[in-house]
Amino acid sequence: MTASKHRSITLTIFTGQQRHDIPNGKRIGLVIGAFIFALTAIVAFSITENKNYREATFATISRKVTRHLTHNISTPDITPTQDVCRSEYPPYLPTLYDHRPDHVSHYTTNKYTRSQNYNIVADDFPPVTDMPPNSKYSLLSTGDTVNAKASAWDPNTNVAVKGPWFHYPDDLMIQTANVIELEGDFVSYNTWIRGNYAHFLFDWLPTISYLRIAYPETTKIILAYDKLSEKILKFLDEDFSNNRVQWIEVNQVYQIKGKLTVTTPKRIPETIGCHKDECRGWDPMRQWIAEKHPEKIEKKHVLFYRRGGATTTGKRVLDPTLEKIVLEHIRQKLIRHGRNEEIKIFTGEDENGNTLSMEDQFTIFRGASTIIGPHGSGISGNFAWTDPFPSNCEERTQLLEFVPSRENSGIHALYADSFGEIRKWPLDFHALLYSNEYSDEYEYTQINLQDFDNALDAMWGGTKQIKSSFKTASG
């Protein structure tokens, strides 16, 4: 018998009293499988032990020891949101223009229910938790590039903050290695989706604006560093960005030598701004913008938002042929209603495909009397630069937004619009549903031109009864 060039592995298993020899071809596979199984068990045990260690080691600060801020909101330069248009306050839903009664009924019920939930459940400023000196704080990545959950704990007592966007501190090695000490007093704020233009403006900036006035200038605000977030804050208020913000890195532990106050949101995302029919939560942000950027543009224009630039995602792009017709309808309606505004098209980019500067975007939106177009960051971010000074219903910037309906919710979430996030801003909200059925094969969206004409007539002709009755523009 010729000797094998390779050492053979004899693997035999016994079942009861019988012996079974395993063929050579299967032996290595079984060994590898057994090794993987054992390794998986070890890792699972380690994770479970680490989780149990954290939960057993760290007591949690309950909601009972959090407190609510009671700072008075002063708005010397603006009219409080609740006083701008009392007849349409509080804001429950946009005015919808659609010729299909069943769509109107479903939309109205759905949006009204959501607004009721916004105004009752979670529309207050997040409570805060006061930590003792020398407490530690960190942000841990959740596995993507835009979200990080916070940890805040007292290493002397092993008491940690617990909340919907918090996690237990990691193991002792991570807690004690490479810790950066920060001198002074700080208040931390963290929420979801950093590095996104619109989300920073409607998720982050409202609370930052409130913390700015609720705490003395000697208290810095801890924020997760992001280049875009820093850019926005520097444009808004460079002195604040340089002197009141403490940018920190994700996956790094910081020890606060002074006082640390931790904001503890009730839920993520937050919907702060309206509570018990009082919608003043965003007034500090509007006051701040009015202080630092009081520019008024006398010659107004109608702004049409066109999606489809290099940085645009999703399929909320109006059919190009239909868009030309829509723009012509806008021109004709401006003439009919005796308005002399020009039409400006906004894509977020210049003629060379470069992203417009903050200054240019500010000027374009500050000068808009009416904004028209599909839901997207171009609207739900730049709303912040619209005129902050309206004092009555007629002075508000008008917004007509195209949103997905039941038959094309695959484009985006059903009835996804800017209203849910920015209803605390004094805009005149209107909505138009996409009209075509949606499939993955469709590259563009459609709107009904008669519904569009009805919307323009109502907005520019003053058909106010539509708002109170939630009926279609055609009756």
Image (tube, rainbow, N blue to C red):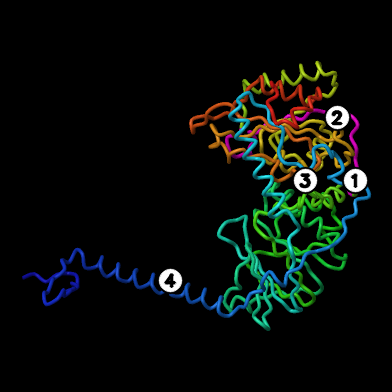
Give how far apart the Cα atoms at labels 4 and 1 are. Answer: 57 Å
Q: Which residue is mark 2?
A: 300
Work out whether mark 3 precedes mark 4 in sequence or the reverse, and give the earlier one. Answer: 4
Point 80% across, 41% down: residue:
89
Q: Is residue 294 highlighted in magenta? A: yes
Q: Position of residue 153 (x, y in %)?
A: 67, 75
Give how far apart the Cα atoms at labels 3 and 4 are. Answer: 46 Å
Q: Secondary structure at mark 4?
A: helix
Give how far apart the Cα atoms at labels 4 and 2 are. Answer: 62 Å
Q: Secondary structure at mark 1?
A: loop
Work out whether mark 1 precedes mark 3 in sequence or the reverse, and give the earlier one. Answer: 1
Q: Which residue is mark 4?
A: 44
Q: Position of residue 216 (x, y in %)?
A: 87, 66
**Magenta region:** 292-316
Work out whether mark 4 precedes mark 2 in sequence or the reverse, and give the earlier one. Answer: 4
What is the three-letter code of the residue carrying label 1?
Ile
Q: Which residue is mark 1?
A: 78
Work out whether mark 2 precedes mark 1 in sequence or the reverse, and give the earlier one. Answer: 1
Q: Are marks 2 and 1 in contact (CB under 8 Å)?
A: no
Front residue (pair 141, 238): 141
